[in-house]
Image: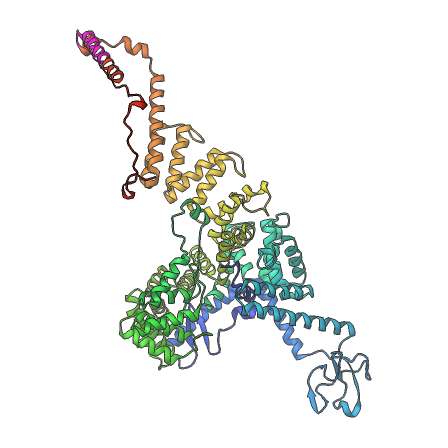
């Protein structure tokens, strides 16, 4: 897989995260609104629904109030008001040159029997915009330019840049070949040279990450500075990242915070996510749970609104440190040979292989790209063989619709019914959705509840989520927050994003539970980390596997800023191994220490042990045994790490950072052996060494002469103990003499006197192993 095979889609998704305040709070569709993951139809409301809607109005108000805490919304609202006023009082255009210089343009005006409500370039070969100052141009011949020659040249240049940009984007989005994508970026480079803002954004990120262009931090920095001057939120966010990570500039957390803030004010969701993490962890700012909640909730609202019925792409979190230390451990990635084996089974008619490959291609992940066409084909084969799971997933695909599968409620309903009749929970959940929203059938809340309950009883997360939503909203049942909380918790255990989102909303508002800002932030953070920008984790991993550590570390560093713990540990690992040449040799350990610290604060055991190691050996900091001891103790107590216990035993044995205590050392060694079977051999060796040290210490502490002077051999061994000793010595001497005599008798013959025996090779099956 190439560094960024999904470059077009990924960067488009990143661009789509820059929203205006109006986009952040507007309804998702006409006549509906989304609250706690549940869509309400405005028409045909029952009394209970009216009650629910009042409740949700208050929740929406709370959401909007939290959003209004951000100055970005206030600024955007002012801007929107200015635009509205500008529409009401549109400025009067004055003709420049022509036959009516200085006179106001007349709209509409008639030219070549066609009315124009705005300036036009029709009738001119040079493309300059002009207008008539009276209604009938043919009659009065009164006209003038709408722009100066300089403005005209600039407009034509921007139009040319836009055309080049569109050509590049078309190639980028329509091709999956790396060579074609490189060609696309040449068009984008040309458009960027012509000061096209979106092209500059694309090119600057490509230069930063080394995506289809040679990585050049300095050039990307210059473009980001140019974009920032133009007010681009993506440029502001990226410049903040450069100052935060010290890439191409001197590290400055204060400047980073300023640029991140401006990026967030411009509506950039990645900037919001970074600020959310910084307020949550207290990085460069005073720790503030409420501020973190505000930023994270805004991003989570957008991520949750993107979740479809078929679900989003799978986020693959691979730890580089675990891969190196445990090479046999599965990383979650499927080997190409294994995929080909499953494909072979599927072609031979293995239904389970067909369904498994269908799901793999539907959601993507584990090294397999998302491909709805192949997913549809595999599900079709399995469904024709009578597999209920495949039927249910076909129903989901038809219900959702895509470029491959046209949206059809009727077809989806048929598949859902077939699967539900066979007791399939996915089909039951799909049928429940159809009755809940009236997709192909009349709305029937009782039937919807019935099918969701059946699906939930079988542990299907969609059924649990929708059942929780019905209890939360009081649709078809009496409103019951405890039941809603129960089913949301069950769905969250299955990893459903909307379940985390709903639980976060409940904890943030104190609905059905005690309000807990900390819990809400952790849940919202989980939702935010499932956004489309998480695809960058996989591209960074592929870059590292392809040997491009510089590209990988920059991508991991950006994700680390967003609060991804796995990215923090992977960035620290690459720096720890000194594999990234873009970071100075003197800076690798201090930067690695910083990211190990952030990963450890999020509960990663290996990072906590690494912090102990860095302070123990003085990597990136001064040697500090006491701090090392604290980190090892935390890893031992909180994560029960055998490595940490062993290290604590060693420090107690040597008296490093703690008073020497051999008994405590033995205790920690024993605990390490109990915690992990892998620790038993090193623990055995350490205990043997400890036993020798203990014996020597004991011998040093006692007076040997004094001990022997107090020993009475007659009393201990009897009055004839000397005879016994002499007998034992005589027996030992006789044994030695006899052994030596036998050795002299067994003298081998000279080689020349031996009979020649032809050498024969043993048969192959009896050959000794080499």
Question: Taking 406 as reference, is 615 above or below it?
Answer: above
Residue displayed at 63% across by 64% down: 186
Is 733 part of what is drawn in magenta? yes
The image quadrant of residue 508 is bottom left
Position of residue 88 measured from the top left corner of the image (x, y, whole percent): 66, 79
The image quadrant of residue 89 is bottom right
Is 581 part of what is drawn in magenta? no
Is 483 on the left-hand or right-hand side of 195? left
Name the main secondary structure of what is drawn in magenta: helix
Residue displayed at 77% across by 91% down: 138
Give the number of marks: 0
Compare residues 39 and 714 and report the one nearer the observer. 714
Position of residue 716 measured from the top left corner of the image (x, y, whole percent): 20, 11
Compare residues 66 and 648 and report the one nearer the observer. 648
Compare residues 735 and 223 and report the one nearer the observer. 735
Is 88 on the left-hand or right-hand side of 457? right
Query: What range of the chain is rendered magenta?
Result: 718-734
């Amino acid at each position: 897989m190439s560094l960024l095979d999904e470059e077009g889609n990924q960067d488009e998704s990143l661009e789509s995260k820059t929203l205006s305040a109006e986009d952040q709070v507007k309804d998702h569709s006409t006549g509906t609104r989304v609250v706690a993951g549940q869509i309400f139809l405005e028409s045909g409301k029952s009394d209970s629904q009216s009650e629910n809607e009042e409740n949700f109005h208050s929740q929406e108000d709370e959401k909007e109030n939290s959003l209004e805490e951000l100055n970005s919304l206030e600024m955007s609202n002012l801007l929107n008001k200015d635009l509205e006023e500008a529409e009401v009082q549109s400025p009067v255009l004055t003709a420049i040159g022509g036959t009516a210089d200085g006179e106001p343009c007349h709209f509409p005006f008639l030219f070549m029997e066609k009315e124009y409500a705005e300036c036009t370039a029709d009738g001119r070969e040079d493309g300059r915009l002009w207008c008539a100052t009276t209604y009938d141009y043919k009659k009065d011949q009164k006209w003038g330019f709408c722009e100066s020659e300089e403005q005209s040249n600039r407009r034509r240049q921007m139009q040319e840049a836009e055309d080049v940009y569109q050509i590049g984007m078309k190639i980028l989005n329509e091709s999956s070949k790396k060579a074609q994508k490189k060609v696309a970026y040449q068009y984008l480079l040309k458009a960027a040279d012509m000061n096209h803002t979106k092209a500059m954004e694309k090119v600057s990120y490509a230069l930063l990450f080394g995506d289809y262009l040679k990585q050049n931090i300095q050039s990307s920095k210059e473009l980001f500075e140019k974009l920032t001057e133009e007010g681009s939120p993506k440029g502001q966010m990226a410049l903040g990242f450069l100052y935060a990570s010290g890439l191409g500039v001197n590290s400055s957390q204060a400047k980073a915070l300023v640029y991140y803030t401006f990026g967030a004010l411009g509506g950039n969701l990645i900037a919001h996510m970074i600020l959310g993490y910084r307020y949550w962890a207290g990085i460069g700012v005073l720790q503030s749970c409420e501020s973190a909640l505000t930023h994270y909730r805004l991003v989570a609202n957008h991520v949750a609104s993107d979740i479809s019925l078929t679900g989003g792409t799978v986020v693959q979190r691979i730890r580089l440190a675990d891969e190196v230390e445990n090479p046999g451990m599965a990383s979650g990635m499927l080997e190409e040979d294994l995929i080909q084996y499953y494909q072979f089974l599927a072609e031979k008619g293995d239904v389970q292989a067909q369904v498994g490959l269908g799901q793999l291609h539907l959601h993507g992940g584990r090294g397999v790209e998302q491909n709805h066409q192949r997913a549809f084909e595999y599900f079709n084969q399995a469904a024709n063989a009578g597999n209920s799971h495949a039927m249910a997933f076909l129903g989901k695909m038809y219900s959702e619709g895509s470029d491959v599968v046209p949206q059809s409620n009727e077809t989806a309903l048929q598949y859902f019914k077939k699967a539900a009749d066979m007791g399939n929970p996915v089909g039951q959940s799909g049928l429940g959705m159809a009755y809940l929203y009236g997709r192909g059938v009349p709305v029937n809340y009782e039937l919807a509840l019935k099918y969701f309950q059946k699906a939930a009883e079988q542990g299907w997360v969609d059924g649990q989520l929708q059942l929780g939503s019905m209890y939360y909203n009081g649709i078809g049942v009496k409103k019951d927050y405890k039941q809603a909380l129960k089913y949301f918790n069950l769905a969250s255990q299955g990893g459903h994003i909307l379940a985390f989102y709903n639980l976060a909303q409940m904890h943030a508002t104190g609905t059905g539970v005690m309000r807990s800002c900390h819990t809400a932030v952790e849940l919202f953070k989980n939702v935010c980390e499932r956004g489309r920008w998480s695809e960058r984790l996989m591209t960074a991993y592929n870059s590292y596997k392809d040997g491009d550590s510089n590209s990988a570390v920059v991508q991991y560093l950006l994700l680390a800023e967003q609060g991804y713990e796995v990215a923090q540990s992977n960035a620290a690992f690459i720096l720890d191994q000194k594999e990234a040449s873009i970071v100075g040799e003197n800076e690798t350990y201090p930067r690695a220490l910083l990211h190990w610290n952030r990963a450890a604060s999020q509960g990663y055991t290996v990072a906590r042990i690494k912090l102990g190691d860095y302070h123990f050996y003085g990597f990136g900091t001064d040697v500090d045994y006491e701090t090392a001891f604290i980190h090892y103790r935390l890893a031992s107590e909180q994560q029960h790490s055998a490595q940490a216990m062993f290290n604590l035993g060693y420090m107690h044995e040597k008296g490093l950072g703690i008073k020497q205590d051999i008994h405590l050392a033995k205790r920690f060694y024993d605990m390490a052996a109990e915690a992990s079977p892998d620790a038993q051999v090193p623990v055995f060796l350490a205990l043997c060494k400890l036993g020798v040290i203990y014996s020597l210490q004991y011998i040093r502490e006692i007076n040997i002469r004094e001990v022997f002077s107090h020993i009475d051999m007659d009393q201990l061994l009897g009055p004839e103990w000397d005879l016994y000793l002499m007998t034992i010595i005589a027996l030992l001497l006789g044994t030695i003499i006899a052994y030596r005599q036998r050795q002299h008798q067994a003298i081998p013959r000279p080689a020349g006197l031996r009979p020649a025996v032809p050498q024969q090779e043993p048969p192959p099956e009896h050959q000794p192993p080499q």
